[in-house]
Amino acid sequence: MSDSHAHSSVHHHFFDAEQQKESATLGMWLILATEILLFGALFTAYAVYRSANPEAFMQASARMDWTMGGLNTLVLIISSVTMVFAVASAEKGSRKGTLWFLFFTAIFGATFLVVKYFEYKHHWHDHDVPGAYFRWAGDPSLAHGAQIFFFLYFFMTGLHALHMVIGLGLLAWMWLTAYWGKYSKEYYNPVEMVGLYWHFVDLVWIFLFPLLYLLGAHLTHGGGGGH
C-alpha cells in the first residue's frame, strides 16, 4: 500500500476539511482545558499543604530518587520530539515515517511507565505509602506532613501515569489506523490531536518533577537519590 492511498473524506456533518480540522482542534483544546482544571486543583492543593508543612515536605522530598525522576523527564522530552516528527510525517503523507515515529513515541512512553513501576516498588519497600503501612524514620513531628506529601505524590503521579496509559492506547490506535492507510496530506487530524494530548501529559510531568523530586534534593546524602 502506498503512502498516497489514504482516506481523506470529510465527514457528512462538516462543510469542508478546514471546518472539520478546526472543530477537532477546538474539541481537543476543550478536553485539555478540563485536564488543566483537574491538575490545577491538585497543584493548588500541593501549594497549600506545602505552605503549611514546609519542613516536612522538604524532608519527604529528600526521600525521592531524583535520578529516576530525571531519567523519566528525559524520556518524556524525547517522546515529545518523536511525537512532533510523527505529526510532521503524517502531514507530509509519509505513512512509513508516521508508523516509525508513533512506534518510538510509544516505546518511550512505555519506558516511562516501567521506570515508574520500579520507583513505586522502592517506595513500597521503604514504607513511604500513606496509610497503616507508612513509616517515618525522621522527626516524629514531621510525620503527618510527610504523609501528606506522599499522598499527593502518589495521587498526582498515579493520575499522570493513568494519562500515560490512555496515551499509549491512543498511540496504538493511531499506529493501526496509519498502517491501514487512513491518513494523508489532506487528512491527518487524529494524529495531530493525539500529539496535542501527548504534549500536554509531558508538560504536566515537567511541572511535577521539580515540585516533587527537586524540592529536597540538596538534602539527599550521596547525591544519588533518596533510596
Image (cartoon, helix red, strand yellow):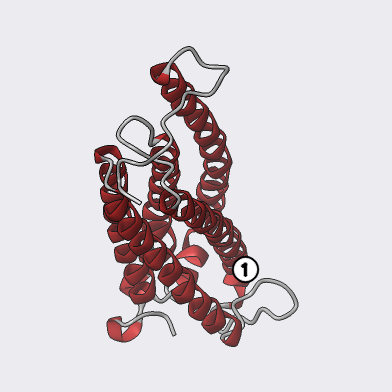
Q: Looking at the rendering, which quadrant does residue 78 occupy? A: bottom left
Q: Secondary structure at mark 1?
A: helix
In this image, 177 relative to 143: left or right?
left
The residue positioned farthest toward the front in the image shown: 1
Location of residue 134 in the rendering, given as x and y in whole percent from the top left corner: 66, 78
At horizontal 52% and vertical 66% (from top left) the residue drawn is 56
Give the answer, above or below, for where 91 lies relative to 100: above
The percent position of residue 155, horizontal first and vertical second, equals: 61, 59
Going 55% across and 52% down the picture, which residue do you hit?
52
Toward the viewer: 12 or 150? 12
Location of the C terminus by quadrant is bottom left
Q: Is residue 177 above or below residue 147?
A: above
- Front-most of 101 and 112? 101
In the rendered structure, the answer to whether residue 6 lies left or right of residue 138 reads left
Q: Which residue is mark 1?
A: 147
Estimate the x, y position of residue 218 in percent, counting from the top left. 31, 72
Residue at the farthest right position: 132
